[in-house]
Amino acid sequence: MMKIDTKFESSILLLITDLTEKFLKESVNYPKFHKYTLVQTINNSINNLRILIIKALRIDKKLTALREADIEIENLKILIRVSYNLKCIGENQYGFWAENLVELGKMIGGWKKKEIN
């Protein structure tokens, strides 16, 4: 079992917290007819991702939570792309999300590799 260092734990939790706050601020600008569908779905996905990361930090058998987190990141990428296509977010916001979700995916991927070895 790999011991997660405090710096890594802090950085991954900070990133998911920043993404949570960013989405909550952006979601008020979504059109009303997307607030109870797309906004709620994205919010649920971010919440699930945060829980999976916390779970992976706290349990001994981390791989299952990390694999599920990886899947949730892919789902979130699709939902953000849909938001962009529907013009709920602009190009700059889409770029922010794409960049940060790729970064989060790299962090999870590196963590998974360390757990396997």
Image (cartoon, rainbow, N blue to C red):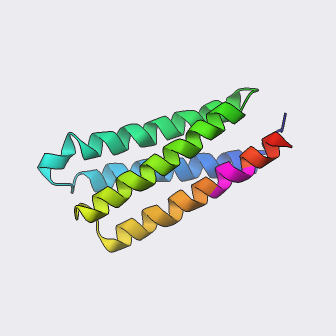
Q: Is the stretch drawn in magenta largely helix, strand or loop? A: helix
Q: Is residue 58 above or below residue 45?
A: above
Q: Residue 53, can we see it?
A: no
Quarter residue 95 falls in: bottom left
**6 or 37: nearer the viewer:** 37
Segment colored magenta: 106-110
Identity of the residue drawn at 27% across and 64% down: 85
- Locate residue 30, reporting x and y percent: 21, 55
Tell me what residue is drawn at x 40 percent, y 54 percent.
Answer: 78
User: Looking at the rendering, in which quadrant would you find the N terminus?
Assistant: top right
Locate the C terminus by quadrant: top right
- For this orientation, the residue located farthest to the left is 33
| Picture mark count | 0
Residue 47 image position (x, y, % from top left): 44, 37
Left or right: where does residue 4 sit relative to residue 54? Answer: right
Position above or below: 85 against 104:
below
In this orientation, does residue 56 appear?
yes
- Seen from the viewer's position, the closer of residues 74 and 107 is 74
Q: Which is nearer the eye, 73 or 59?
A: 73
- What residue is shown at x 23% (from left), y 52% (from top)? 28
Image location of residue 4, percent across then percent down = 78, 42
| 83 to 96, vertically: above or below | above
Please indicate whether residue 89 sits to the left or right of residue 36 in the image. Answer: right
109 falls in the magenta region: yes
Estimate the x, y position of residue 48 in percent, counting from the top left.
47, 35
Residue at the limit of the structure toward the bottom, as seen here: 91
Residue 8 forms part of the magenta stretch = no
* Identity of the residue drawn at 66% across and 54% down: 107
Asked if residue 52 lies left or right of residue 83, the reply is right
